[in-house]
Amino acid sequence: MIRKFRPIYWSELRKQGEPVDIKEEMGSYEAKTRLPELLRRASQGESFTITVHGKAVADIVPSGQIHR
């Protein structure tokens, strides 16, 4: 299940100098199916939260980004 938010253009946020900490959420099955795409997008700076039965269980974040 992907939660729908209004479109956000990362390039616009970065131009404004604001920190980008917005994550797309998706279920574990969809994440498994789209893993290559998620990894490519993470390498470009995007972050994702993976859920199981609606509960957040894992994050995919760009390498080198500290996330605790």
Image: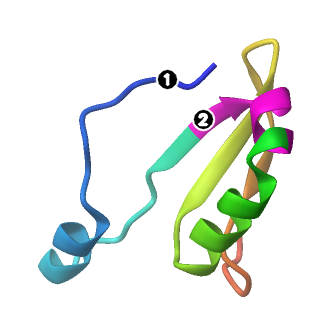
Residue extending furthest toward the top: 53
Residue at position x 24%, y 74% in the image = 11
Q: Dot 2 surroundings within 10 Å: few (below 14), some, or many (20 or more)?
A: many
Residue 44 vertical position relative to residue 47 in the rendered view, above or below: below
Residue 48 spot, x, y in % from top left: 63, 50
Does the magenta portion include 31? yes
Q: Looking at the picture, how far across and down is residue 37, in whole percent?
A: 67, 60
Q: Are marks 2 and 1 in contact (CB under 8 Å)?
A: yes
Q: Residue at x 24, y 33 (%)?
A: 6
Residue at the disc numbered 1: 3
Q: Which residues are magenta?
A: 25-32
Q: Which residue is mark 2?
A: 25
Q: Quick one: SS at disc 1? A: loop
- Compared across the picture, whether 28 is left or right of 15 comes to right
Is 20 displayed left or right of 50 in the figure? left
Label 2 amino acid?
Glu
Q: Residue at x 68, y 43 (%)?
A: 49
- Placement of 14 over or under 8, stated as above or below: below
Which numbered disc, 2 or 1, marks the residue that appears first in the sequence?
1
Neighbourhood count class around disc 1 (C-alpha, 10 Å): few under 14, some 14–19, many 20 upward: few
- Judging depth in this view, the residue of 30 and 55 nearest the camera is 30
Instruction: Report the amino acid beneath label 1.
Output: Arg
Given residues 65 and 24, the one toward you in this image is 24
Image coloring type: rainbow
